[in-house]
Image (cartoon, helix red, strand yellow):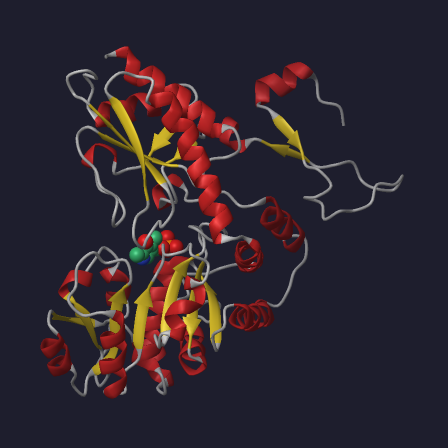
Amino acid sequence: MSISRRKLLREGSQVVAGACALGGVSANASTPAPVVGVDYYQKLGVTPFINAAGTYTILSASILPDQVQAAIALAAQKPVHLMELHKAAGEYLARRLRCEGAIVTSGAAAAITLATAACITRGNKSAIANIPTDMQGLKNEVIVQNAHRYDYDHMLRDCGARLIDVETLDDYEGAFSDRTVMTQFFNAAEGGRINREDWVRVAHKHGVPCFNDAAADVPPIANLWNYTAMGFDLVAFSGGKGIRGPQCSGLLLGKKELIDAAMQNNSPYSNTVGRGMKVGKEEIIGLVAAVDWFLEQDDAAMEAEYRKRAAVIAERVTTVPGVEARIFIPPIANHVPHLLITYDVNRVRLTASDVMQRMREGTPRIELNPSTGGGPASAGLPGGSNVIVVGVWMLQPGEDQIVGRRLQEVLSKDS
Ligand SMILES: *Cc1c(COP(=O)(O)O)cnc(C)c1O
């Protein structure tokens, strides 16, 4: 097949997939010609950007490491029995992540739903088909701290759960009833008067399982087992954030009995709350490969690399009069070095939101962290009308230079 240069230019740049995406098939006379991949972003007119934000869902979270992409490309070529794959992947992940059981879920959000479904339906097969609309005779109360209520509450309510709010340890002790099925903890919550140890201890005293949503809370790598080791019966992580697996993947980790119950509520089983939360072989293999990749990383080396990138950007922007920069590490979620840029508003006459907009509209497009200018963002990231936040951990090699240069240009223009 020959493609004319004009056709290439007309239809968008096309990329020849290398041997790695084909699974390392050795080159010989009978090897079929390499597959030509079409750049569908270009074809669809969707312009990618440099990710100076972080692992935000709406910004498509993270980029798959090469070895994860290669593993998915290989897995995509062959059919397997989905239940065999789920089981094998779950056992492999449980072993590597030091827990009794694991499921690859459709994002951390699905892990929250499956955890809740497991706690409501365990030991009661017919309940699986009945939730959330036919709750008669089913226990459905989930205890949560006021300060841990958040935008993912709907994932629990999808199972027909009723959330019971508590504030103090006394409230918590008094909130258990014969209808309590689970207690829920938001690991990166900024408020809340009851700590993890007390939360788990009191739940277990009442014989109730404890769930922890730690979706965005790696690195450190060891958090993948820290919370199950602490006694949480079920723990959720996002697959597409720090672990850098497929965006629509997640992990539910925990006690074997509860993981088995969660799986009964999951796709590919029909007539379950989880049937619409399917993961395919590509996501399952992708997340397993991403966990392998992530476990090969080193916390100190990652931090050093992010600090280096932040320093590259800081050096450029601080050449602009009135601009200062420092490194900031959020306490739990997104616990990696970010660059915090502040400036004298008398010398740079732009709001940080204006800077964000100009970076977004420039060439190349650059997305800054959403807490820039005081907008909504992840727990623990400060903002303000003259505060620019740069998330450096998702930058690709060389992009720190580009982000530094563009920020310098934008900040100098109106100073
Ligand atoms: C991102 C996030 C989720 C959802 O994760 P997905 O993998 O996108 O489904 C749930 N809870 C918290 C705290 C998160 O940060």
- Give the residue at x 27% y 47%: 378
Q: How many marks?
A: 0
Q: Is residue 11 above or below residue 269?
A: above
Q: Is residue 186 above or below residue 118?
A: above
- Give the residue at x 38% y 47%: 336
Q: Is residue 56 left or right of residue 21?
A: left
179, 399: nearer the viewer: 399
Query: Where does residue 304 sit, x and y in percent of width and height?
Result: 47, 43
Query: Where does residue 306 sit, x and y in percent of width and height?
Result: 44, 40
Q: Is residue 393 above or below residue 362?
A: below
- Give the residue at x 39% y 24%: 315
**Which residue of the protein is positioned furthest toward the right in this rendering?**
29
Name the quarter where the N terminus is drawn. top right
- Give the residue at x 23% y 55%: 151
Query: Where does residue 208 sit, x and y in percent of width and height?
Result: 27, 83
Query: Where does residue 276 sit, x and y in percent of width and height?
Result: 40, 61
Q: Quadrant of residue 383?
A: top left
The reply to whether residue 273 is visible in this rendering is: no
Q: Quadrant of ligand 1?
A: bottom left
The reply to whether residue 297 is visible in this rendering is: yes
Q: Is residue 56 left or right of residue 8?
A: left
